[in-house]
Amino acid sequence: MDSAFFFTYFLQFVISGITIGSIYAMVAVGFNIIYNVTEIINFAQGEFVMLGGLIMVIFYNKLDLPILIAFLMTVIVVAMIGLLIDQIVIKSIKQPTVLTLIIGTIATSILLKGAAMFIWGKNPYDLPAFSGREAINFFGAVIQPQALWVIGILVVVVGLLSFFFEKSIIGKAMRACSDNQDAALLVGISVKRMILLSFALSAAIGAVAGVIVTPIALMEYDRGAMLAVKGFAALILGGLGSFPGAVIGGLLLGLIEALVAGYISSGYKDAFALAVLLILLFVRPHGILGNPTVAKFKKF
């Protein structure tokens, strides 16, 4: 095997890893938004991704709406589902604790999965790629145009969130709630509204991830659970509570999986990724960029 072939082979795996890692990163960012306001892990985050892909199928494939309108309507519908989860599940739990709230999100995940199976069935669904499927040659490696959309949208999402949390009044109010909810109440911030907004925002980000990944990997009713596991692993790998850590953790997890699948076997990719996570937690329990005290809402 000559050096040029080895480089092309390696580059192909890196491109694949960055693409899927970008999806993991978006799921991890969604986890972080809710965690930083409520200190709970929303294990229904993966279902938001699943719903994003499947609802987009209805708007675009079934109703023949223009792709941009279908995209925006999908994000709005899934964001509304996030609002309903906060109002129906989170708010209805009496004497809530972190543990009971997390259990509530797990129950929600199961219910959403069952509802999706009832509505869409068990078959996988596809969406057309945003810019067609004609591959791009990059130093001998093949890049699907949709992969560029995935990476580009991740950059846009991170940039918009950075602006939102650092510059907007609402974003600053959410950061205040994450630091001290009692103090936020004293200065007139509605903590309940900020929690409501965090669920809507994380659901919207999940929907975006679902729409952009479906043309690459298809989407089906049970895909959300594994995406939630991978997103949570990326979150812990990068550092719980850290937005840049979530992005780095997602990309690193995707790269590990792609390289292991390419050089060893696809059957071992999940095991190797989780093994790296466990090793890192032994060495650095708070993750790559996480703070030992789990500081909240650090700058992007």
Image (spheres, rainbow, N blue to C red):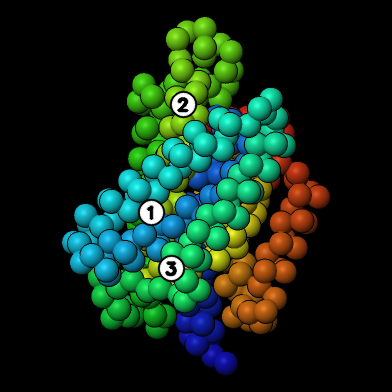
Front-most of residues 44 and 211 = 44
**Secondary-structure class at tag 1:** helix
Q: Which residue carries the number 2 mark?
A: 194
First in residue order: circle 2 vs circle 3 = 3
| Circle 3: residue type | Trp
How far separated are the C-alphas under marks 2 and 3? 32 Å
In the rendered image, the residue lying farthest to the top is 186
Q: Crowding near pointer 3: few (<14 within 10 Å), some, many (20+)?
A: some
Front-most of residues 167 and 213 = 213
| Circle 2: residue type | Met
Give x and y (percent) for residue 4: 48, 85
> What number is the disc on residue 208?
1
Is residue 18 visible in the rendered image? The answer is: no
Q: Is label 2 in contact with label 1 (beta carbons under 8 Å)?
A: no
Q: Which residue carries the number 3 mark?
A: 120
**Secondary-structure class at tag 3:** helix
